[in-house]
């Protein structure tokens, strides 16, 4: 039976020769990721074992990843206490993939996982975070779940009662114009599909524009697949996946680059000509309220944010620095930059990217989710407007229901910081070397996944 | 096909209407996410909609009251607090559609969710919810219910995911297994 990537991965993980959309399966889980909401998972996990007389032990402590990123350092006593409880649980259970609030290991979960080689093609990844779809960029089947469902995974090592999703094939051809980025591509797609257009479905990305896209861009596409409602957003693995895993993540194990069958069944095919795209802006208060920049150009902004699991990567910061180098952000604008990991922060420092951003007036924050979810580190005042490279603009998202959030690419965010209004990147900017890649890590911390 | 059932599973009143695409940020704002326990989350339900938050907190809506929402209710974050905060008030959510993770969380926690793509109702209308239809007895109109994902039925039958997983854990640990 011909299968999509999602069907192949779910068949293998469920011990079946083949599955097709609509079947209910119970795939074994290769990696189970949580962040601070592990506090609730721990509570629910203990609840499962309550009054059974059975000791509450996780199924495999080497397959659980816990990364502190949503509230780092803790913004409240309550969070600090949650983090403390999680540390105690990690020690008790012997959980190995734990990334604490430290500059030698920390960052946003959706950057830490790829960067450390925790996700390989063909893997089943679950996370108590809706943006777990990010890891589909590695050719894995990765999806978000709630805390109680994660507790169940911790107990049993399998995702219970998963309906095999249908797949939408997204074919992207052509070359993106200068400064038009994967963020513009995915915003355009979300606008076309709508916020629920891919509900219960998988987006599988194909076409020469995808094949030529570095992993950092693919991670943006998969990350925001969930904003169209998708269960997962998968980029079938190829030589770029292998390069990233070997050279950036230092992964040394065997790799199986799961491919869809040529005659796999797709419910829908969406074609995009990348060369025809321009800058896209998601306007308040839904992510699918996407407009081309000409329709919102000139809108006054108060806060610019570059960062998050969507656009806090080294090339995102470098593009922004290229535009800001030797210039100053506009009076009355504050610009916050959240590198997605400490490794990115340090590499960006070495390249002079951080200097360029600081000289322009940007504030460099510690890696983490920052103000994206409205907890701390950059609230908006009543009536204020943020322009952000993050992934959500729902009412109240940045902590104030009387403020508004627009979403855009790093290039548009940087250009708009210079003018204080939504603006296109200026012409004639010399870019930081866009081909820069991380050197291979020196340590050998990666684990086998299989 | 199941035969139309004769007695309603729930007789309720529509107490609040919501639009399409109500996100989990609106249902349970991110700044309260450090509060995790289901017993503590209800106080922050719809905290950015103060009027609604107050009506809930002061017990203005009897348990079992219905909210009617548009498409894609619960879109966005996977935060389970968005389901537990509504479960705390024992609301029934009738929506034209739900986002995947929210619906899954709701079923796992036993929050009553009804997928009713054509629902039309106004605040104050009396609703009767049957297995396969919602009847608005105020307007006399009937609207079909879309069944919940079949993959979740075993969890609903077990009374929620904790109970379901517990039975699996016990079975795995029994001497015969």
Image (cartoon, grey):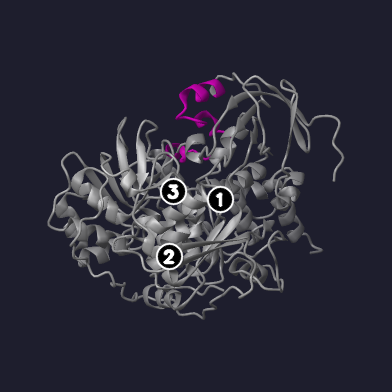
Q: Earlier in the sequence, mark 2 or mark 1?
A: 1
Task: Reply above or below: A146 against A284.
Answer: below
At which x and y percent is residue A150? Answer: 59, 53
Disc 1: host chain = A
Question: Circle 2 sits on which residue?
Answer: A218
Camera-nearest label, 2 or 1: 1
Q: Are marks 3 and 1 on the same chain?
A: yes
At which x and y percent is residue A96? Answer: 48, 64
- The mark found on residue B98 in the picture is none
Q: Secondary structure at mark 2?
A: helix
**Left or right of A363, for residue A278:** right
Task: Reply above or below: B120 against A195.
Answer: above
Which quadrant holds the C terminus of chain B?
A: bottom right
Disc 2: host chain = A
Instruction: Determine the CA span between mark 2 and mark 3.
Output: 34 Å
Q: Residue at x 61, y 42 (%)?
A: B98
Q: Nearer the viewer, residue A76 or A308?
A: A308
Q: Nearer the viewer, residue A140 or A37?
A: A140
Disc 3: host chain = A
Q: Nearer the viewer, residue A131 or A417?
A: A417
Q: Is residue A218 visible?
A: yes
Q: Are marks 2 and 1 in contact (CB under 8 Å)?
A: no
């Amino acid at each position: 039976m011909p299968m999509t990537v999602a069907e192949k991965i779910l068949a293998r993980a469920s011990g079946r020769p083949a599955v097709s959309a609509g079947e209910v399966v119970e795939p074994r889980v290769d990696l189970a990721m949580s962040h601070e909401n592990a506090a609730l998972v721990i509570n629910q996990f203990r609840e499962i074992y309550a009054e059974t007389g059975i000791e509450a032990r996780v199924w495999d402590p080497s397959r659980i990843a816990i990364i502190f990123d949503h509230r780092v350092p803790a913004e409240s006593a309550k969070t600090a206490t949650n983090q403390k409880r999680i540390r105690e649980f990690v020690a008790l259970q012997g959980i190995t993939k734990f990334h604490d609030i430290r500059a030698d290991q920390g960052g946003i979960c959706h950057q830490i996982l790829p960067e450390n080689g925790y996700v390989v093609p063909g893997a089943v990844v679950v996370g108590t975070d809706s943006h777990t779809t990010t890891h589909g960029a590695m050719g894995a089947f990765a999806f978000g779940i709630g805390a109680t469902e994660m507790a169940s995974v911790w107990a049993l090592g399998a995702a219970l009662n998963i309906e095999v999703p249908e797949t939408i094939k997204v074919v992207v051809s052509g070359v993106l114009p200068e400064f038009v980025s994967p963020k513009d591509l995915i915003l355009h797609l979300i606008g076309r599909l709508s916020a629920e257009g891919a509900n219960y479905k998988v987006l599988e990305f194909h076409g020469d524009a995808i094949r030529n896209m570095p992993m950092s861009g693919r991670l943006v596409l998969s990350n925001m697949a969930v904003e169209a409602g998708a269960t997962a957003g998968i980029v079938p693995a190829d030589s770029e996946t292998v390069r990233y895993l070997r050279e950036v993540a230092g992964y040394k194990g065997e790799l199986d680059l799961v491919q869809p069958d040529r005659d796999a069944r797709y419910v829908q095919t969406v074609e995009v000509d990348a060369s025809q795209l321009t800058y896209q802006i998601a306007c308040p208060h839904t992510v699918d309220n996407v407009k081309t920049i000409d329709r919102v150009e000139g809108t006054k902004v108060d806060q610019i944010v570059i960062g998050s699991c969507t656009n806090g990567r080294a090339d995102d910061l470098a593009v922004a620095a290229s535009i800001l180098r030797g210039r100053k952000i506009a009076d009355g604008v504050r610009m916050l930059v959240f590198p997605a990991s400490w490794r990115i922060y340090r590499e960006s420092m070495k390249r002079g990217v951080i200097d360029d951003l600081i000289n322009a007036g940007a504030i460099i924050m510690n890696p983490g989710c920052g103000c994206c979810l409205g907890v701390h580190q950059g609230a908006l005042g009543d009536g204020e407007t943020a322009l952000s490279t993050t992934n959500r603009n729902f009412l109240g998202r940045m902590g104030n229901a009387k403020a508004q959030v627009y979403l855009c690419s790093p290039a548009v965010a940087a250009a708009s910081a210079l003018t204080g209004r939504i603006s296109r990147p200026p012409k004639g900017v010399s870019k930081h070397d866009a081909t820069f890649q991380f050197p291979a890590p020196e340590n050998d911390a990666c684990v086998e996944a299989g | 096909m199941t035969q139309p059932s004769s007695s309603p599973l729930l007789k309720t009143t529509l107490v609040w209407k919501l639009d399409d695409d109500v996100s989990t940020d609106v249902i349970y704002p991110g700044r309260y996410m450090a509060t995790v326990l289901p017993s503590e989350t209800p106080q922050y339900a719809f905290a950015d909609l103060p009027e609604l938050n107050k009506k809930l907190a002061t017990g203005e809506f009897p348990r079992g009251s219905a909210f009617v929402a548009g498409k894609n209710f619960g879109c966005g974050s996977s935060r389970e607090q968005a389901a537990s905060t509504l479960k705390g008030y024992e609301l029934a959510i009738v929506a034209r559609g739900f986002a995947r993770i929210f619906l899954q969380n709701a079923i796992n926690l036993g929050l009553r969710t009804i997928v009713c793509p054509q629902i039309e109702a106004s605040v104050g209308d009396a609703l009767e919810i049957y297995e396969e239809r919602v009847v608005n007895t105020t307007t006399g109109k009937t609207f079909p219910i879309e069944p919940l994902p079949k993959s979740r039925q075993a969890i609903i039958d077990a009374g929620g995911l904790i109970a379901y997983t517990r039975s699996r854990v016990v079975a795995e640990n029994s001497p015969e297994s």
